[in-house]
Image: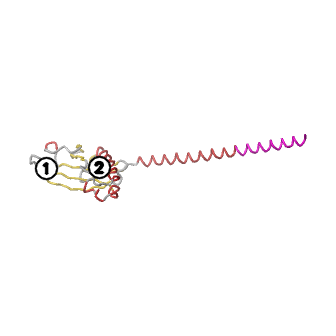
Amino acid sequence: MKNLIKNQRGTLLFEIILIVIILALAGFAYWQATQIRTVQENSAKEQKTEKKKESSISIKELGIKMTLPEGLDDLIYYTKADQQETDANGKAYTATYVYFSTKSLLKLDTGCAAAQGPIGAMTKFGSDPSVLSLPNSGAAKKVGSVHVEFSEPQAYCSDIAEAKGLADKQKKLLKQAFETAKPLQ
């Protein structure tokens, strides 16, 4: 009988130690999961902070500054300044053309150079374009004292599907940037 009681005490002591070990392991696992979650939350907060940083571009040829949405950080442009043009009625006017691309699009296809305007173009008119007989080719607005028009490209710069997809995305982003245009100071 004494041996049975000793065995029961030994078993009970073993069970208590086993329960303590299991609780310690569960506590450690919970603590570790909490630490990982905290690190992930802090990382997510840092990423959100980084995304809030906006970049902008000043285009002196157009006399404007635009805020660039994420995805246009590598915007590049080509300018044809002070071009003498005539409208459909023969009226002379001066225009400055700025054609846009991105370095990321250019990496996909060298045919997507800024001079081709694969994601759009902007035109600055020397006078109010509403008095000219021009085809309505895009969104126009007055930015300070300057009249600027945004127009989308007529065709893709590439036959590569990935380049077409990126160009479509970046056209929309450039149009968003155009909406933020402010006079250059």
**N-terminal of the two: label 2 or label 1?**
2
The spot of residue 166 in percent (x, y) is 34, 51
* Magenta highlight on residue 6: yes
Q: Residue at x 27, y 52 (%)?
A: 156
What SS does tag 2 mark?
Answer: strand
Is 69 in front, or is 6? 6
Circle 1 residue: 93
Tally of marks: 2
Circle 2 residue: 65
The spot of residue 181 in percent (x, y) is 28, 46
Span shown in magenta: 1-22
Q: Residues within 10 Å of mark 1 (few under 14, many from 20)?
A: some
Instruction: Identify residue type, mark 2.
Output: Lys
The spot of residue 108 in percent (x, y) is 34, 57
Is 118 in front, or is 165? 165
Is 47 in front, or is 142? 47
Q: Residue at x 40, y 48 (%)?
A: 53
